[in-house]
Image (cartoon, rainbow, N blue to C red):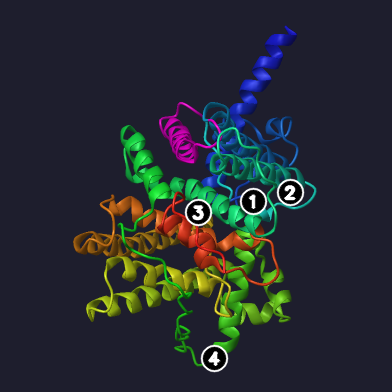
Amino acid sequence: MGNSSTLRFAEKRELILDGAAQLFNRRGIKAGTLSEVAASVGLATNSLTYYYRKKEDLVVACLMRSIGALDGVIADVDARIPPGDLAGRVRALVQGYVALLAAIEDRLRPALIFFGDMRALPQPQAEPAFAAYVAMFRRLRGLLHAGEAGAGVPLPPVRSATRQALNARSHGLLSQLLWARAWLGRYETGDYPRVAATMAGLLLHGLAAPGQTWPQQPLPVPDPAPVDTSSAETDPAVRDAYLRTATRLVNDHGVGGASVERIAATLELTKGSFYHHHDTKHALIDDCFERSFALIRRVQWAALAQADQGASNGWQTLLAATLPLMALQTSAQGPLLRLTAWTELPGALRWQKLGTMNRLGERFASMVVAGQADGSIRLVDPAVAAQLITGLINGLAEVEHWLPGDGPPDLQPLLARPLLMGLLARPLPRT
């Protein structure tokens, strides 16, 4: 009887976690409630609290399960693919994670919560979740570190400059895996293995055709985007400060954690001043998206203008459309908004932002096609390539947490080059 009760408890708990992950993915951690989770799995709210007393406890349980699932894929690859085989490890990692997503999509495995709103968790619940996430990141870093070392060669310690570069590659790879959840739904799950193979090939070999080079000097930050001054009551400087501050807080704490009080306090303004500029917080997040989209468009259009004048081939155009965004991220104009924040917006607004992201991604795809036509970019799937470029941009939002050091790091060689030239590309000579 005891074993039977334990089994029923475990089954019901898994059902709750599955329902909660689906709800929080749809509504966001802040907006989703225990009563909604309970209703989704056919329980009364007081019955659900028998399993999880607070919503934050349930959120942590969902996060720990998602972290554990990804950690399990990393551990499996580490056990199966020997050190020294970086290509084999990256392929197995991408294939394993995409297979996990296919199983979830086919309802063969329970849903897993997104990590986007994780920073909105309060203490003490946040501590174990972040500890598990950091441990998972370190295991992924170790997977790459061992893959880059020769088989049978003792691993050198991860120190100083090599630590920053390895952190960047690890962060870039993890960002691509997590971003895949935003775009794999375009494909049927039967196509997932083929897409995984394409994705792994791009991560390993990049986009550049033989003979193409990396810029010797960083591409500069673009000129500031014009500020909307359509409202006579809006001070452009204050409005832009709101948008930059809100963007930074959403990147760091999620939409739920970027409260009106926190935004106003950071700017040393009153809540009344906030509502003078934005009716609701979601209206502010909408404007933050539009600001980031405007900056991305400005860089894309500048790159395409050079191409139209015959001043660049396809590879150079693609670099001109992506590398300045790295410089922008750590400039006074930055940061760009974490694109996965779209999952935390209400219905109609959510799909509107996703539609804009898709259109911007199509512009990257057209650049890849142009480069293939002139021979400067390898023959690859331009749709998948465009998603990896978008994933690179999304990965900028949290880069400061994974690249320790004094002052802003140079993201162009650290983060962009391993994707655009490939993880197997020969490293740049040290200066």
Q: Residue furthest left?
A: 373
Q: Amino acid at mark 1?
A: Met
| Kind of residue indicated by mark 3 | Thr
Q: Is residue 24 visible?
A: yes
Q: Nearer the viewer, residue 216 or 372?
A: 216
Q: Is residue 234 above or below residue 326?
A: below
- Disc 1 versus disc 3: nearer the observer: 1
Placement of the N terminus among the 4 image quadrants = top right
Secondary structure under badge 1? helix
Give the residue number, with chain letter if any, for mark 3: 343
Q: At 69% across and 76% down in the image, what residue appears?
A: 264
Query: Any mark on residue 126, and which?
Result: 2
Is residue 234 shown to the viewer in this render?
A: no
* Label 2 to label 4: alpha-carbon separation: 40 Å
**Closer to viewer: mark 1 or mark 4:** 1
Between marks 3 and 2 in the image, the one whose residue lies nearer the viewer: 2
Task: Indicate which disc, 1 or 3, sits on the residue closer to the N terminus.
Answer: 1
Q: Residues within 10 Å of mark 3 (few under 14, many from 20)?
A: many
- Disc 2 crowd rating (10 Å Cα; few below 14, some 14-19, many 20+) is some
User: Toward which corner of the image does residue 431 lie, by quadrant?
Assistant: bottom right
Distance from Cα at disc 1 to Cα at disc 4: 36 Å
Q: Is residue 415 above or below residue 234?
A: above
Of callouts 3 and 4, which one flags the residue occurring earlier in the amino acid sequence? 4
Cα distance, mark 1 to mark 3?
13 Å
Q: Are marks 3 and 4 in contact (CB under 8 Å)?
A: no
Q: Which label belongs to residue 233?
A: 4
| For residue 413, above or below residue 108 | below
What residue is shown with label 1? 118
Residue 6 drawn at (x, y percent): 71, 16
Task: Tell which of 23 and 308 is nearer to you.
Answer: 308
